[in-house]
Amino acid sequence: MGYDIFRLLSSIISFYQYVVIAGAILSWLVAFSVVNPRNQFVEMISRFTYALTEPALRHIRKIIPSLGGVDLSPIVLLFGLEFVRILLKQVLVVGF
């Protein structure tokens, strides 16, 4: 039972990690003018990733400011999600 719950939560965490990575890559592509932000498809993906990731990233940005225009908050969020996954595995699968 615990393993099944862990697999479900792990899948959700993995999906969220992919969304964070996609949002970061898309922001780089827009910043370097590789893609047109006024393109309807790009705008849709951008809004989707922003809506899902910005609430978590906003809290991290309050603690860790950007370093000369480099935003480290997605990296911190990815490490935090991986930490949560390891913690869930320890609690749900292995036990205390």
Image: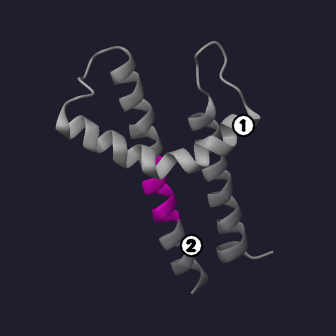
At x 29%, y 43%, the residue is: 45
Q: Secondary structure at mark 1?
A: helix
What's the residue at 68%, 45% (across, down)? Answer: 59
Residue carrying label 2: 6
Helix, strand or loop under label 2: helix
Residue labelled with disc 1: 62
Residue toward you, 80 or 38: 38
Q: Nearer the viewer, residue 3 or 53?
A: 53
Of marks 1 and 2, the one in the foreground = 1
Is residue 4 or residue 68 the one in the foreground? 68
The residue positioned farthest toward the left in the image shown: 40
Q: Is 14 contained in the magenta span? A: yes
* Magenta stretch prevailing secondary structure: helix
Q: Amino acid at mark 2?
A: Phe
Residue drawn at point x = 66 percent, y = 67 percent = 88
Local crowd at mark 2 within 10 Å, few (<14), some, or many (≥20)?
A: some
Q: Residue 15, relative to residue 2: is it above or below?
A: above
Question: What residue appears at the point 42 percent right and 56 percent down from the top-left corner?
Answer: 15
* Residue range of the region highlighted in magenta in the rendering: 10-18
Query: Quarter holding the N terminus?
Result: bottom right
